[in-house]
Amino acid sequence: MKTIADLHIHTISSGHAYSTLQEIVQYAKSIGLPMVGISDHGPGMPGGAHLFHFLNMRILPKEIDGVRVIRGIEVNIMDHQGSIDVDDRTLSLTQYAIASLHPPCVPFADKKTNTETLIKVMGIEGIQIIGHPDDERYPLDFDAIAYAAKQHHVLLEINNSSMNGVSARSNSKTVIKELLAACKRHQTHVVFGSDAHVSFDVGNFTYCHQIIKECDFPLELVVNHQMEKLKSFLPKVFND
């Protein structure tokens, strides 16, 4: 199945990534990837982009050199009450948002607390994806997470970078297998994300494909290859 989109990509605006928007688009074109989602970190991440960055993304062309550019954000969850680092106006001007737990922003906690935190965040209008719920340092009740994601019509990310052997996240491959098993039980949709911090990783889902094969996970629950399902989960992308 042909990949139509990578929705988790960082530019130099994230502060710890290494490629410009133009370099990302050029690389996407070279590999035949039709859509890129630019999801730089919000200001809660040290070095992350200022809110003005996201408010100004409307100046971006919808298409550059034949590649569709989608205006996104990776918001940082800032506490266990489910607060995030951007306001409603900023969310309303992006076409989609990934929400993630990051150690510089929110402390590690027990399984019940982490699970309740992510479920609260799923209820925020404008959040479409939970990013890399695969870090053993943030233990989760995956049945509860998969059920809530389905109820809130939110995608759970299978993060390629988490499995690349150099990620700071802990024991992610084992954790992702648990996540996929829960998603399979609840028929919850997932999205592959490269989490690219350099252009050469854009559209790289090598480990994602390997793990869903190992887990016998149904391809129909992966939205990266299905335009109609992508439209269902990210309506602003196609109506804007």
Image (cartoon, rainbow, N blue to C red):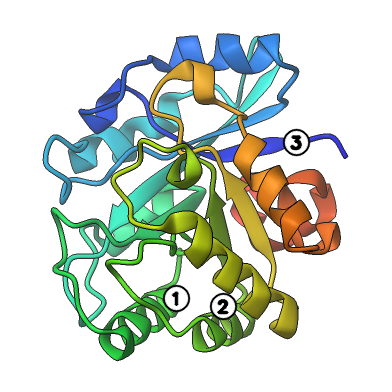
User: Mark 3 = which residue?
Assistant: 4
CB under 8 Å between callouts 2 and 3? no
Residue 94 place in picture, x, y as percent: 44, 47
Whole-angstrom CA distance, mark 2 to mark 3, is: 22 Å
2 and 1 marks in contact (CB < 8 Å): yes
Q: CA distance from mark 2 to mark 1?
A: 7 Å
Q: On the image, numbered disc 1 is attached to which residue?
A: 122
What kind of residue is marked 2?
A: Ala
The outermost residue toward the right is: 1
Instruction: Using the rendered view, name the quadrant where residue 198 is placed.
Output: top left
Label 1 element class:
helix
Other residues around mark 2 within 10 Å, as few (<14) / some (14–19) / many (≥20):
many
The residue lying toward the viewer, choosing from 192 and 87, is 192
| Label 2 SS | helix
When the figure is inspected, residue 3 is found, relative to residue 13, above or below; the finding is below
Relative height, residue 235 to residue 205 (above, below): below
The amino acid type, in three-letter code, at marker 1 is: Met
Q: Position of residue 73 (x, y in %)?
A: 39, 46
Q: Residue at x 31, y 63 (%)?
A: 88
Q: Does the rendering let one see residue 204?
A: yes
**Residue hosting label 2:** 149
Q: Which numbered marker is on residue 135?
A: none
For the N terminus, which image quadrant? top right
